[in-house]
Image (cartoon, rainbow, N blue to C red):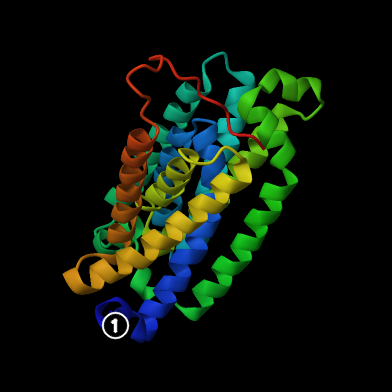
Amino acid sequence: MEWLFEPFAVSFVQRALWGGVLVSLMCALAGTWVVLRGMAFIGDAMSHGMLPGVALASLLGGSPLLGAALSAGAMAAGVTALSRSSRVSQDTVIGLVFAGMLAAGVIIVSRSQSFAVDLTGLLFGDVLAVRASDLRYLAVALLLAAALAAAGHRAFVALAFDERKARTLGLRPAAAQALLLALVTLAMVASFHVVGTLLVFGLLIAPPAAAALWARRIPLIMLGAALGGSAATVAGLVISWHARTAAGATIAAVAVGLFFVSAAASRLLRRPFPSAPSSVAVERPAS
């Protein structure tokens, strides 16, 4: 078993492990609602929507993290505002804002020739470069995400399964949607410098989707997603150490792989007997 523990004898791999676990916990809180509400597109769009803020901050010599936060916040606010006032669907609004933000980012990048390395780090991250200060920042972000998830839990449940009932109960679906977007934005912004904007999407979607195949209650889905993301972090770091592959990409690939394994196992274990009816009722997760 020495090969399993060998990577974690190095301090920067230890920090990468803790960073990946914190990111997994945060993505479990936000990603569960993204999966249950079918909001995968907003997660993908948000990961690209941070590009103009990061590029502009780098161009002006500012903080890329602050730029990412401002850019993602602007995108979330734009989607919320346009969804309320526009007659087009929310998916269309997200697509329009996403295309506009991505175009703005590419235009900003095209004005400088010094972004090649920075953009590689932005897109794919550098989990092995996590510092102690990054861990403190991630811990604070996780506490804030937990507070948002707890505050909006009842409204999120109603919003996920029956928006009309949420309105009847006086839970203000529009405000709940805005709070949910804030939770997703926080998870994306806090995590992008660890696993990158493209790869954080894998941790946001794959572990909750895998857990939702087995659990019916929302807290159990979140717990399963947290455990799955943490397991993907450990396995990804071990594989990347021995195979000499990119650590962040390997973690995300393992997370996606675990989903397919979980889906296959769920299908095999829950396959009906030959005499059973062909249609099987699907139950909604409970809160």
Q: Nearer the viewer, residue 220 or 75?
A: 220
Q: Quadrant of residue 142?
A: bottom right
Q: Quadrant of the N terminus?
A: bottom left
Q: Quadrant of residue 159?
A: top right
Q: Is residue 202 left or right of residue 154?
A: left
Kind of residue sitting beneath label 1: Glu
Q: Is residue 54 left or right of residue 261?
A: right
- Across and down, in percent, residue 180 comes to 62, 40
Q: Is residue 204 left or right of residue 254?
A: right
Q: Which residue sits at x=58%, y=47%?
A: 220
Q: Farthest residue toward the front?
A: 275
Q: Is residue 265 visible?
A: yes
Badge 1 is on which residue? 6
Q: Secondary structure at mark 1?
A: helix
Q: Which residue sits at x=63%, y=55%?
A: 145
Q: Which residue sits at x=52%, y=77%?
A: 133
- Across and down, in percent, residue 74 comes to 56, 42
Q: Which residue sits at x=32%, y=62%?
A: 248
Q: Is residue 63 visible?
A: no
Q: Is residue 249 left or right of residue 23?
A: left
Q: Eyeballing the image, is 44 above or below 25?
A: above
Q: Quadrant of the C terminus?
A: top right
- Across and down, in percent, residue 169 comes to 81, 25
Q: Eyeballing the image, is 113 above or below 19?
A: above
Q: How many marks?
A: 1
Q: Farthest residue toward the left?
A: 243
Q: Nearer the viewer, residue 137 or 209?
A: 209
- Across and down, in percent, residue 136 comes to 57, 74
Q: Residues within 10 Å of mark 1 (few under 14, many from 20)?
A: few
